[in-house]
Amino acid sequence: MTLPHIFIIRHGQTDWNAEARLQGQEEIALNALGRTQAARNGRHLAGLLGSTVGSFRFLASPMLRTRETMRILRTELGLDPQGYETDQRLIELHFGDWQGSTLTEIGTKDPQAVAAREAAKWTYVPPGDAAESYDMLAQRAAPVFQGLTRPTVVVAHGGIVRSFLKLYGAMPPTEAAHMVIPQDRILEYRDGAIAWL
């Protein structure tokens, strides 16, 4: 299916990102670099949208780091920082019992689990009651994108970007699961084509 014009932006860096900790659904605020990245993306987006900014819907994950990124972004666009919507289905993948740890720390305790995840990263579900795979996340997020009816700026998470690339960018699941998702770039979807800006 063809979606409307979409810009997807990952939230700026947090201290846990800098430490390579699995954040998942833990609420961690942006750090100084993260706020700088969000402002950079806002200025870049201002140049891309120009006078069309008013035709765009603004939609974010309701998590702390995405809302902070969206507020900074909209400030750079000259818009009301609070004038956006949230959707619970855009929250990050839940890493279960692994949240707050690095893969190095997890690998010290359970190297077999880390190896199993590496071998099938898209479908692997970490231990823990609420844990999800990227495949489960993509199924959760897909209806959000399918329901968009106008040009939209989305601020979300690395897992949501991976899901979008797999669902609408024809990216193989293994590649989507392993690629680095930048926090200082913007992903554009337009007329079925995807590009990093």
Image (cartoon, rainbow, N blue to C red):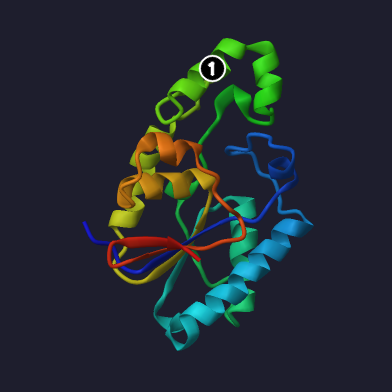
- Toward which corner of the image does residue 35 lie, by quadrant? bottom right
Q: Where residue 20 sits in the image (x, y, percent)? A: 69, 37
Q: Is 128 on the left-hand or right-hand side of 21?
A: left
Left or right, 154 with respect to 79, comes to left
Q: Residue at x 45, y 54 (%)?
A: 87
Q: Amino acid under label 1?
A: Ala
Is residue 81 among what the camera can see?
no
User: What residue is rendered at 75% in x and 58% in y?
Assistant: 33
Residue 16 in the image: x percent, y percent?
72, 41
The secondary structure type at the circle numbered 1 is helix
Quadrant in which residue 52 is drawn = bottom left
Residue 48 shows up from this direction = yes
Residue 78 rendering spot, x and y as whole percentages: 60, 82
Q: Is residue 71 depicted above or below 34 in this figure? A: below
Residue at the far left: name it.
1
180 and 133: which is toward the camera: 180
In the image, residue 174 sits, relative to residue 127, either above or below, namely below
Report the residue marked by disc 1.
Answer: 115
Quarter of the image where the N terminus is located: bottom left
